[in-house]
Image (spheres, helix red, strand yellow):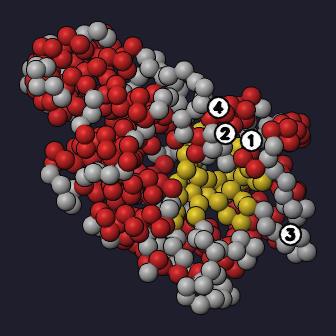
Amino acid sequence: MLGNLFKNLFKSRPQPQGAGGQAGEPGALSEAPEFVLRDPVLSRSQQIVGYHFHIRHPEGHRPWEASSQRFFDQILLDRLGQMDLTAVTGRRLAFCELQAESLTMPNLDALQPAGLVLSLRDGADPSADAAPLRQRALQLKSHGFQLALPFGPSPGLLPLMDAADFIHLPAGQISPADLLTLARTLRSRHPDTPLLAEGVDSAELQDACQRMHFDYFRGQYLTRRGENREPNLSSQRLVVTQVISHLRRKESDFDKLAMLARQDLGLTLRLLRYINSAALGLRSKVGSLEQAMTYIGRDGLYRWLTLLLFYDSTSSPMDGALRETALIRGRMCELLARQRLSKAQCEQAFVTGLLSMVDVLFNMPMEEALARLGLPDEIQLALREKKGPYGAFLSLALACEQGDASSILEQAGACGITPEAISQRYMEALGWALHYDVSLES
């Protein structure tokens, strides 16, 4: 049943009040899948500064039903209370999306307030007395929580605007002219409060919001290739793609690969630094590229070079955020493959997930990006058509990222994994990607 999906994410499941409906009907919340989604929030410099946690409501959910809204908010708060937020945020901000009336929920007091932003949806009853709600909001703020308010709150919430730490706007639902007018008005009235643009689902809209002096951005633009932009290929990235392409050729020995790598000094220094790092524990230092490549082998070199595509100090400032998303996908594919495939194939599954972002990273169509890399046919098939031995793993990783209930259930069967286990794997992938990214950076 759909209600069991991600069950272990919510060990304490609240029951809806007055939800009504029978199982299988659109309003039957007892059958609704509960997805906790974690979307990155980026700064003007395109660095990840926090994550937005929210529930993706199932089809048939009626957002005007206050009881069902509180039901989903209760689930979210319960899950955050059980979650190690530090593990899945890396000590960045955590934006928790709630309707305003949910501020009265007592389990909010059990959460650690440091770095937690209560991002309020407006749905307050205009006829209700808002004074207790305002008092509760200020109480939570005094305990260390931060507040993010919608740009045009109901009259009862207006007095809280001066106490807001963020103001969020649904940028994707507002015309550019109106969005500019709103941004200017909010800047004049609340000059010290950062503006957060939400629903930013294209690079073009992000550029527009940047020019309108928004401070933070949330939306799918991070995983979508921008149109009419130059390819994002530095000299190091070009050399790395050449070495990856030659790795599959039997006639290319390590001497040939080292000669290619020497075209970029930065790549040479990175490989030698990696080989001689304390983590590998070599007794004597390695001084040549040929020795380094021999030590880690073709499979190890293949994985390391693929990762290095996302670590380029001369490339776009957004690459760090892209890398984190790619690492999550790669790790999720690898964890799913462990149940059915060999160790070498698990490595290939990881590379598949990682390179699912290569079109966005290079800012070119996937076909053009794949032509530069000369990847194994199985990986290319997964990236092009979501088919082959790794296609289902990639499809499931993407479905988890998007909170797509039907796709998760469909791909769970194809991957031979229960829906309950999927949530464990995905949370593990989120935490691993944060830790691994920091380790590689250092």
CB atoms at circles 4 and 3 under 8 Å apart?
no
Distance between the Cα atoms at labels 2 and 1? 6 Å
Which tag, 2 or 3, sits closer to the chain's start?
3
Distance between the Cα atoms at labels 3 and 1? 24 Å
Q: Residue at x 28, y 54 (%)?
A: 335
Q: Foreground: 181 or 277?
A: 181
Please, what is the three-letter code of the amino acid marked with disc 4?
Answer: Arg
- Pointer 1 residue: 195
- Pointer 2 residue: 216
Give the x, y percent position of residue 263: 29, 9
Which tag, 4 or 3, sits closer to the chain's start?
4
Q: Is residue 287 above or below residue 397?
A: above
Give the x, y percent position of residue 28: 60, 84
Secondary structure type for disc 1: strand
Q: Nearer the viewer, mark 3 or mark 1?
A: 1
Q: Foreground: 178 or 150?
A: 178
Q: Residues within 10 Å of mark 1 (few under 14, many from 20)?
A: many
Please, what is the three-letter code of the amino acid marked with disc 1?
Answer: Leu
Give the x, y percent position of residue 114: 58, 52
Please, what is the three-letter code of the amino acid marked with disc 3?
Answer: Ala
Which tag, 3 or 1, sits closer to the chain's start?
3
Distance between the Cα atoms at labels 4 and 3? 35 Å
- Pointer 3 residue: 130
Q: Nearer the viewer, mark 2 or mark 3?
A: 2
Q: Is residue 215 visible?
A: no
CB atoms at circles 2 and 1 under 8 Å apart?
yes
Q: Residues within 10 Å of mark 2 (few under 14, many from 20)?
A: many
Which tag, 2 or 1, sits closer to the chain's start?
1
